[in-house]
Amino acid sequence: MKNEKNILIALILTALSAITSAQGRVVTGVITDNRKVPIVGATVCQVNTTNCTAADRNGIFHLLLESGRDSSLKVECLGFNPVEVVINESTSFPLNITLAPMYIPDEAFLDDSYSERDNSVTIRSSLILDAVFSDFAEFAPLLGAYNTDLMDYFAVAGPEFGASFSRIYVGFGLGMGYSYNDDYDTLIIDLNNTSYKLNFGYDLVNTNRIRITPLVSVRWLKYRLQNYAGERRISLASYLEERDLDLRFNQTIAVAGLNIEYLMYSQTYGHSDYWSIGLFGGYAARLSREPWIYSRGNRIMTDEKINFKPLTLGISLSYYTIVK
């Protein structure tokens, strides 16, 4: 009796195997979009047949191919461009099938990687506000705290122009500070700031929305401090006795930090110019020990130093142009 049961099971398995073999083989696969998100309900059909199935909530499908028919698959889903997949003896399973949204042209379909932009040059035009926190405390006994307190904050705004190629960024910027004016007794304190900077960076992260770039910046900071009488007209004797103060401080610093930008595309990602809003934070250090100081052509010698608080900040509004 037991032998008869075993023979019956063997005959059933043999029959099922023969039927499956006659019908064809089972193909499996996963259907996702460019973000690797599963596409639920995508239809998979054997070409030129009514033999179809649908992807489950994980984007996975199974389809038993009909023998003697074309083994290619047609994959469709509402809102996506259809894809045809050829099945042959060398095909490995499971299949990984990616569907492109219909609103993105086939030739413009990209994933979130940087690969198709690696061989293009991107031009950056920016308006940047930079803040550096300097410390003129060592000059207070000579210049007076009313001057040095005003010089402890260096803020400039201006353009920066740069280019990126293969993730490497190089840019040059000019910053101009508005004129700080303050009254002190009978004096007018007038301070103007200017900076020049050269930036080097590498795009550590660059997706369709976020760019993260470590930056090294070399900056030349220029302070012009003037003290002059509050009255428009003074006597020659008073001028010769009190003389106007006109000092021009020059200091070079290096800044190492991180720039984070949010990208905004007006058309297709990777194939159009775009805008960005950015935030920069970094650490500042002096390159020259003492500043170079000039006054009406005279080179002023000093042992005092301009110190800097480590944190530097910057915000930017940028426009990027892709050059093929």
Image (tube, rainbow, N blue to C red):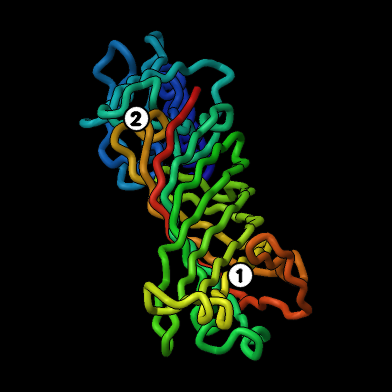
Does residue 66 lie above or below 189 as drawn? above
Q: Residue at x 56, y 82 (%)?
A: 242
**Closest to the observer: 242 or 161?**
242
Q: Is 304 displayed left or right of 65 in the figure?
A: right
Do we see residue 28 in this rendering? no
Tell me residue 109's x, y (percent): 39, 28
Q: What residue is shown with label 1?
A: 247
- Which amino acid lies under the numbered mark 2 shown in the image of this protein? Ala
x and y percentages locating residue 13 in the rendered image: 47, 32
Graded by Cα atoms within 10 Å as few (under 14), some (14 to 19) or many (20 or more), the crowding at tag 2 reads many
Q: Could you tell me if residue 177 is visible in this image?
A: yes
Q: Give residue 170's quadrant in the image.
A: top right
Q: Is residue 188 left or right of residue 105?
A: right
Q: Residues within 10 Å of mark 1 (few under 14, many from 20)?
A: some
Name the disc covering residue 100, or none: 2
Would residue 296 appear left or right of 212 to someone viewing this image? right
Rendered residue at 56%/52% (across/down): 213
**Does dot 1 land on a helix, a strand or a loop?**
strand
| Element class at badge 2 | loop
Residue 177 vertical position relative to residue 276 in the rendered view, above or below: below
Give the CA distance from mark 2 to mark 1. Answer: 63 Å
Of callouts 2 and 1, the N-terminal one: 2
